[in-house]
Image (cartoon, rainbow, N blue to C red):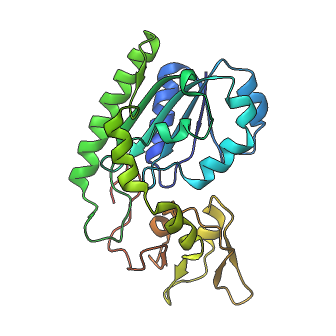
Amino acid sequence: MVVFYFSGTGNTRYIAKRFSRRMNAECYSIEEHADFDFLIRKEKTVAVCYPVYGSMVPRIMREFTEKYKTALMKKKLIILCTQMMFSGDGARAFARLLPGCDRNVIYAEHINMPNNICNFFLFPITERERIRKKKNADQKVERICREVKSAKIRRRGWSRFSTLLGKSQNTGFPELEQKHRSSFKADETCIGCGLCVKRCPMGNLVLNEDGRVEQKDNCTLCYRCVNICPRRAATVMIHAKPKKQYKGPCKKS
């Protein structure tokens, strides 16, 4: 088995790493410079891990999947997706990227993780939530590993109810996603340190000659820049300055 993941702010990376260690599998971020075609073709099973955005697969993971579709469609698939609350069919959303591959999915599960949307008042970041959800996620990953090793088949998100719930969330999201490809902003407190430029998974950001951050209209809405900016100057989609930042499931906000 080989594990591939995309993680905006650490939640999915944590799950992918923990799962791969328990399964003795190689684990790669899709942001790495690797021969992914070779890595896919040499294994019988591919596990993919990603966060759910609007009950959809993030654009960066969709583009990765399209690039390696031919190799992926021949593999057994394990799909693990992280979510803040519930996504309905967030795991099945990946299967839809590979037409006819439902029969290849041997396991699919949703895992609740702490909120990383750090500047929306309805979703406050709390240490209590981080501890509780991390603990529950650890237990779920242990259960997932036991079931995969025992060849139990589970396909979370494949029921009619899950499909309807997912549709209720992703209606209009493709248009929203497209609209906000150019939504990055840095306010007047930006010091031009270039951290967001270096860490952007899409290569969307550059520093101009004046030390200001400019964008290439290619944001994938991962919220990484918002959560790592040392001055909390960066925002995407929601342009409210964060009071707290999310530093991942193993660190305090």
Q: Quadrant of the image for the C terminus?
A: bottom left
Q: Quadrant of the image for the N terminus?
A: top right
**Quadrant in the picture for residue 168:** bottom left
Q: Position of residue 179 (x, y in %)?
A: 55, 73
Q: Is residue 233 visible?
A: yes
On screen, residue 51 versus residue 77, left or right, reads left
**Quadrant in the picture for residue 152:** top left
Q: Is residue 87 visible?
A: no
Q: In this picture, is 41 found above or below 215?
A: above
Q: What residue appears at the point 47 percent right and 22 percent down from the top-left corner?
A: 22
On screen, residue 93 versus residue 29, left or right, reads left
**Quadrant in the picture for residue 163:** top left
Q: Position of residue 84 (x, y in %)?
A: 34, 50
On screen, residue 172 versus residue 33, left or right, reads left
On screen, residue 216 versus residue 38, left or right, reads left
Q: What residue appears at the point 64 percent right and 85 percent down from the top-left corner?
A: 212
